[in-house]
Image (cartoon, coloured by chain):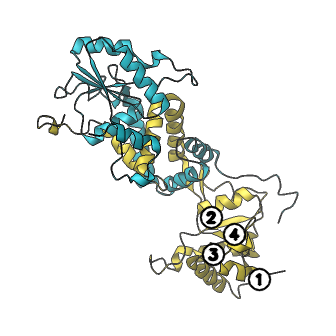
Chain colours: A yellow, B cyan
Amino acid sequence: MRSNDFSKIKNNMSPDIESLIQKFSRLPGLGPRSARRMVIHLLRNREQSMEPILTNLEQVYKNVKICPICSNIDTFTDVCSICSDGRRRKDIVCIVENVSDLWAIERTSCFFGQYHVLKGLLSSLDGRGPEFLKLDELQDRCRENGVTELIIALSATVEGQTTDHYIKNFFKNKNIKTTSLAHGIPMGGELDYLDDGTLFAAFSARG
Amino acid sequence: MRSNDFSKIKNNMSPDIESLIQKFSRLPGLGPRSARRMVIHLLRNREQSMEPILTNLEQVYKNVKICPICSNIDTFTDVCSICSDGRRRKDIVCIVENVSDLWAIERTSCFFGQYHVLKGLLSSLDGRGPEFLKLDELQDRCRENGVTELIIALSATVEGQTTDHYIKNFFKNKNIKTTSLAHGIPMGGELDYLDDGTLFAAFSARG
């Protein structure tokens, strides 16, 4: 079938659809193949799937706001629904790395205080210094709201622990208790499969 | 921290964002976790990522059309760019199960004829009968365009092969050659890891 006449014909796919696939494929967790599958599903279910997603995405795009107090992402309200919820305690603030960590904590329903979302963890490699932690703002907020405890809920990675240490140091001698999440065996975890560091931490913090 | 006062507070996430995550998680290849990651990425990159995707999706949504001749999906043009491309041969038609298969063949640039996209493969389980193959329409088209060959490019599954057989039978004694894709060892495939069926087919069709 291949002939010189036909070699000029190339890719008859709609450029709009192609660029949509390309844009989706750049999202985290998606590659070119899964993006294509997704877009084909959307195209084939124009009314049932594409339309509701489009409307919803439009709404979120228009109304998404970053809370000026805690940097949580919310829609419609200027101050996010957590900061403006009068039933939540204002004297305990939980420090998280990003909004997905905040949402993860919210899903557990174990915390009823407020949040402080960092702009990122300290990282000399990625050039993120203390200004990314917005600790001065947090200190002002602590003074205004009479915060008594800061829960530092960061990942147990090198960057997370460095940041944890820096924050603790910053609030030393400022009359605010700083606590960190406990390290130990995860629920359902078998001792046999645990790494040495976790086992060591679990032993040290036994009680 | 858990107390009766606080137990009423539940999930302070924006319902818009939550429903967007839910909608994305229903797409093929995505689950609740990957959908959440995707949405968070979009929220954090509102200008660079969310806006272009939104605009593009809107465009595709408005302009997407199903070709009345071959059932390919395209934007803007009523008759798809493959059917309306005068340089492509009209006397060879390739029968595919769906648009993603069509795109896969287009990417190889090995075929310069036209297509016929089925509504689905024959399946007694899912209740798909011969009307899903639109063979009468295809026959009319063959007569009009003087089609001499039909390439049946269906998956090597039971349903695919049943449909292949049905189409071949339908066009028997109608002066149109029907061919199927070759079965054999995939490129880069090691004999050792091949299933028996493929090896058998490769042996039978050796040449």
Q: Which mark is residue A94?
A: 4
Whole-percent x, y for residue B127 in the image: 56, 20
Residue drawn at x 44%, y 33% as measured from the top left: A43
Amino acid at circle 2: Cys
Camera-near label (1 vs 3) is 1
Name the chain letter of the residue that bears numbered label 3. A
Q: Nearer the viewer, mark 2 or mark 4?
A: 4
Q: Residue furthest bottom?
A: A173
Looking at numbered disc 1 in the image, what kind of residue is underneath it?
A: Phe
Q: Tell me the crowding category of disc 4: few under 14, some 14 to 19, or many 20 or more residues within 10 angstroms, Cα based.
A: many
- Above or below, A34 against A207 in this view is above
Residue A187: % across, % down:
75, 66
- Which residue, given by chain and number where applicable, does mark 1 sit on? A203
Label placed on residue A156: 3
Mark nearer the viewer, 1 or 2: 1
Mark 3 secondary-structure assignment: loop
* Element carrying mark 4: strand
Task: Decide which of tag 3 and tag 2 comes sooner along the chain.
Answer: 2
Instruction: Check the residue under mark 4 and report the chain it is in.
Output: A
Query: In this figure, which residue is indicated by the disc labeled 2?
Result: A70
Task: Depth check: give the residue in front, B169 or A101.
Answer: B169
